[in-house]
């Protein structure tokens, strides 16, 4: 069906365009349309085979290098090393496969949201059919509690309210009407439409189906999610570039030194072949992919302990580079629970603290907490609001306060509990239910002393029209309506929804009430202003993000005035500036990019707007995190560098599209996650800064030996031993490093910043030459003094390992001195060095290791040489850090 703006057409035109009457389609026509338009369900995406998904985890240049290393060791008949390396590769793939949830689950979740049954009029008769059988033109009957089965244009309604927060971000149920709206109305303003998978909370109605399946608003979201390109993370991009560069460098070096050895020295082909294999093995950082995966996995565990559940492993690191957080308002920055904030009576103004439906909070007047039992006007106002009410709040099994009923009424019930006013000893005798036509609700109650009262609440303008006087401490005074209209406007300017209340005493014999009983002579009691307030913890978290150089932007489907009010409380940007989805709709891509940066509050947005804003920010090299809990957030979450879903109130669709789920729906967990992400990235860089000089030192020794035409000071299998034990013990300890000082006071790193800057390259080269040079000098000294080659190699290997152990302490702090920050406050370091010492003792003194690695036991005296060399390396690196500190800080 060609798309039409059904919401802009009147009901007669809609029915005519769809060729249907209010008696519905006949069965034959319904079958034809079902054949033409297809079933009312979302198209299923072809799933990748689990084996293919698993194999994709091997598609990484560094993994290829590891596999090449395994092949090389197999060619050398060192099968133990081959299996160890292959095990590292396999474990790396298994962790990634198990940890990462796939985005197809999000699409499946959307399909599961579709209504199972639909009440339709066909052949002039009402019947229930499977929702999948609905077609455009079907007349659908909606009742309270129904899940809407398709996108429907209303043709009649009876006080119809629909919960749309998951789709539009609207924080309270939306009143629906049948009248057409403007052609440029955004989704949240199309009040004559009800949307697939939203929930009818009040009243009922009838409508004609105008879209099914993928043509519905939720279907469009599903399509967007399947089309959204999921971008890779900064670390993966950098590691991929580094791996390609490293592989080319290794191949070039081995070929060059094969040529040098063959041309200038008298190596045999076998010796030369073994020498360049040793060079290749020395240059390959076998442990790096495993250390990266383990570091990320440990970060996942630490985040889980702080209620941030990571679904996609590389996202842990990406959090550390986030420059912009785009947050949905309803349910993310706020609790999605209406809360009374201000109360006005004839003589007083009160402020109410607390958030949500929890009755924790105070009522104050002029900043001072008051005894509500002594505030006669307040007491009567709260009684009226609580008695003229059909909702309840109570604790659930998890000790959370939950609402049964309308959010607005729930806020009024909570107000009564905060005030300690419980008029439940009043008995209700009759009710005039709320209807959108008259915009109020009235109840008849009998008090404990037998008196009867009418209590009324509703839209302020309507209630004012019913009143001539205002109640003031048992006195009636003339009502100044203009003054109260001004007060209403002031409350509304703060983004609060305003409810008014009134009452009057009636004859004790009154048993029923109707419209004529409330149309006049009501006594005005006052106003209650309510809002879906910010989470208290979100305010401090946003401040922490600002300190960390991260911009926070609010993107919501709610109204601009409400968005600005919440933004002001949260401290988001220039809260006086807000731009709406209508305005975004008319912008070019270039204009949108400019607005995405200059504005921080976006209101009345649709899912397409959220997705476009994320893309616009990414085009300007921002690393974007998008938070949300509704279906409408899912496409933007999937596109964002880091998608963050709410775990408690978030839909399954949103969780499926997200990289991270907050188990406690607490925005503050995002700031904690960013801190953890930065720490993890620091630890990954520390691991790289530690591992590469190991390989560099080994490669330097081998290259120097080839250039000098001497026997290798360390053999290929000894190189593999050093690489394995330093990666398994020392490098792993760096994964447990705590955050460095000021980690949340520095700006985010540039997304295009190289993982190896000039200073890092200098440090790697410097330490490689330092450790490799000392190892080579000691080997040459020993050989020149008649030591056996196996003994000289054994001491050389231990000097290499000792240098790495001492250098590990240097690497704990990239910016600061180990002397000022501490040596062993990370227990993992002590454990790692202890295990390393045990490994080396086994390596040197056990006969079977002597046989495998061609080592020999050495005397105690030589260990002093080994330790002395390591300590010398530590002191020289600390001196280098001191001399280059200003350079290091600017780059690191």
Image (cartoon, rainbow, N blue to C red):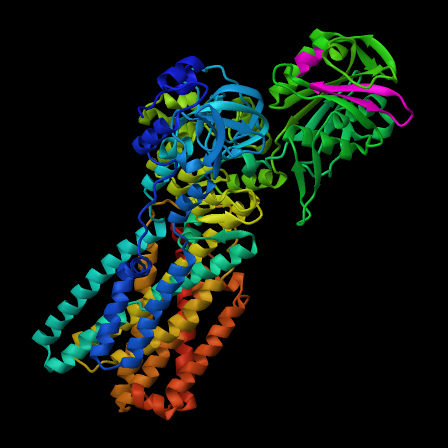
Answer with left or right where residue 712 lies relative to residue 394. left
For residue 752, above or below residue 268 = above
Answer with left or right where residue 750 lies relative to residue 260. right
Percent from the top left, x then y, of residue 79?
27, 80
- Whether residue 413 is visible here, answered yes or no, is yes
Quarter of the picture holding the N terminus: top left
Membership of 454 in magenta stretch: yes
Membership of 298 in magenta stretch: no
Q: Nearer the viewer, residue 568 or 114?
A: 114
Q: Residue furthest right?
A: 449
Residue plotted at (38% across, 23% down): 585
Residue plotted at (48% across, 26% down): 125
Percent from the top left, x then y, of residue 857?
37, 91
Find the magenta span and give its range.
Answer: 441-464
For residue 420, above or below residue 735 = above
Percent from the top left, x then y, of residue 687?
39, 63
Q: Nearer the viewer, residue 824 or 446?
A: 446
Percent from the top left, x then y, of residue 886?
41, 51
Residue plotted at (38% across, 85% down): 843
Q: Nearer the viewer, residue 11 or 45?
A: 11
Q: How many marks?
A: 0
For residue 887, above or below residue 705 = above
What is the quadrant of residue 516 in the picture? top right
What is the quadrant of residue 31 in the picture? top left
Answer with left or right where residue 709 lies relative to residue 234. left
- Whether residue 555 is visible here, answered yes or no, is no
């Amino acid at each position: 069906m060609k798309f039409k703006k059904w919401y802009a057409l009147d009901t007669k035109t809609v029915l005519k365009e769809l060729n249907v009457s209010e008696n519905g389609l006949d069965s034959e026509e319904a079958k034809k349309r079902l054949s033409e338009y297809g079933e009312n369900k979302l198209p299923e995406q072809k799933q990748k085979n689990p084996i293919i998904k698993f194999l994709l985890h091997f598609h990484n240049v560094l993994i290829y290098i590891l596999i090449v290393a395994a092949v090389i060791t197999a060619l050398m008949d060192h099968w133990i090393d081959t299996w160890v390396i292959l095990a590292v590769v396999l474990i790396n793939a298994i962790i990634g496969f198990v940890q990462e949830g796939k985005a197809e689950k999000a699409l499946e979740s959307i399909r599961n949201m579709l209504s199972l049954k639909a009440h339709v009029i066909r052949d002039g008769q009402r019947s229930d059919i499977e929702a999948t059988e609905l077609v455009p033109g079907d007349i659908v009957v909606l009742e309270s509690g129904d899940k809407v089965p398709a996108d429907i244009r209303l043709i009649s309604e009876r006080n119809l309210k629909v919960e749309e927060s998951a789709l539009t971000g609207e924080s309270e149920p939306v009143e629906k009407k049948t009248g057409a709206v403007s052609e440029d109305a955004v989704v949240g303003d199309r009040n004559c439409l009800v949307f697939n998978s939203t929930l009818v909370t009040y009243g009922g109605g009838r409508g004609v189906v105008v879209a099914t399946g993928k043509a519905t608003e939720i279907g469009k979201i599903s399509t967007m999610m399947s089309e959204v390109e999921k971008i890779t993370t900064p670390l993966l991009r950098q590691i991929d570039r580094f791996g390609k560069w490293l592989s080319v460098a290794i191949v070039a070096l081995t070929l060059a030194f094969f040529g040098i050895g063959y041309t200038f020295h008298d190596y045999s082909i076998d010796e030369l072949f073994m020498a360049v294999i040793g060079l290749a093995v020395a240059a390959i950082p076998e442990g790096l992919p495993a250390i990266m995966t383990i570091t990320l996995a440990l970060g996942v565990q630490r985040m889980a302990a702080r209620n941030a559940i990571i679904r996609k492993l590389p996202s842990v690191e990406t959090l550390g580079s986030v420059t912009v957080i785009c947050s949905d308002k309803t349910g993310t920055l706020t609790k999605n629970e209406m809360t009374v904030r201000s109360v006005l009576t004839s003589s007083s103004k009160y402020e109410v603290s607390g958030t949500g439906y929890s009755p924790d909070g105070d009522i104050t007047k002029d900043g001072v907490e008051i005894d509500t039992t002594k505030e006669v006007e307040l007491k009567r106002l709260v009684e009226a609001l609580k008695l003229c009410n059909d909702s309840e709040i109570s604790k659930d099994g998890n000790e959370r306060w939950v609402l049964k009923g309308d959010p607005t009424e729930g806020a009024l019930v909570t107000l009564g509990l905060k005030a300690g006013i419980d008029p439940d000893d009043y008995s209700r005798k009759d009710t005039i239910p709320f209807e959108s036509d008259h915009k109020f609700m009235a109840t008849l109650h009998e008090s404990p002393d037998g008196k009867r009262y009418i209590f009324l609440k509703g839209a302020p303008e309507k209630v004012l029209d019913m009143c001539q006087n205002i109640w003031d401490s048992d006195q009636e005074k003339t009502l100044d309506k203009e003054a109260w209209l001004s007060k209403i406007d002031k409350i509304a300017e703060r983004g609060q929804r305003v409810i008014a209340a009134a009452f009057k005493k009636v004859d004790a014999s009154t048993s029923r009430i109707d419209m004529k009983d409330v149309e006049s002579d009501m006594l005005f009691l006052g106003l209650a202003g309510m809002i879906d307030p910010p989470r208290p913890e979100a305010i401090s978290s946003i401040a922490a993000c600002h300190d960390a150089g991260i911009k926070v932007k609010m993107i919501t489907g709610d109204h601009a005035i409400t968005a600005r009010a919440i933004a002001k409380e949260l401290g988001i940007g220039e809260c006086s500036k807000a731009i709406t989805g209508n305005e975004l709709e008319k912008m070019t891509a270039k204009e949108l990019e400019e607005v995405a940066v200059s504005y921080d509050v976006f209101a009345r947005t649709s899912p397409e707007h959220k997705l476009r804003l994320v893309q616009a920010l990414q085009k300007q090299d921002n690393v974007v995190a998008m938070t949300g809990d509704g279906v409408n957030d899912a496409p933007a979450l999937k596109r964002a560098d880091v998608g963050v879903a709410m775990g408690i109130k978030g839909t399954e669709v949103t969780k499926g599209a997200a990289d991270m789920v907050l188990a406690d729906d607490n925005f503050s967990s995002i700031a904690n996650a960013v801190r953890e992400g930065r720490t993890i990235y620091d630890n990954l860089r520390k691991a790289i800064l530690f591992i590469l000089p190991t390989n560099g030192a080994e490669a330097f020794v081998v290259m120097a030996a080839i250039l000098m035409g001497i026997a290798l000071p360390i053999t290929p299998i000894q190189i593999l031993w050093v690489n394995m034990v330093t990666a398994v013990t020392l490098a792993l300890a760096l994964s447990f490093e705590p955050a460095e000082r000021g980690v949340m006071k520095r700006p985010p790193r540039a997304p295009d910043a190289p993982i190896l800057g000039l200073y890092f390259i200098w440090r790697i080269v410097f330490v490689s030459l330092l450790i490799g040079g000392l190892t080579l000098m000691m080997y040459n000294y020993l050989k020149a003094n008649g030591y056996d080659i196996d003994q000289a190699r054994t001491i050389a290997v231990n000097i290499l390992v000792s240098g790495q152990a001492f250098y590990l302490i240097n690497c704990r702090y990239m910016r600061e001195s180990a002397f000022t920050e501490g040596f062993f406050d990370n227990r993992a370091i002590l454990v790692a060095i202890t295990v390393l010492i045990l490994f080396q003792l086994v390596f040197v003194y056990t006969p079977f290791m002597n046989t495998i690695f061609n080592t020999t036991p050495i005397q105690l005296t030589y260990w002093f040489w080994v330790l002395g060399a390591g300590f010398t390396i530590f002191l020289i690196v600390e001196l280098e850090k001191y001399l280059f500190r200003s350079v290091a800080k600017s780059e690191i």
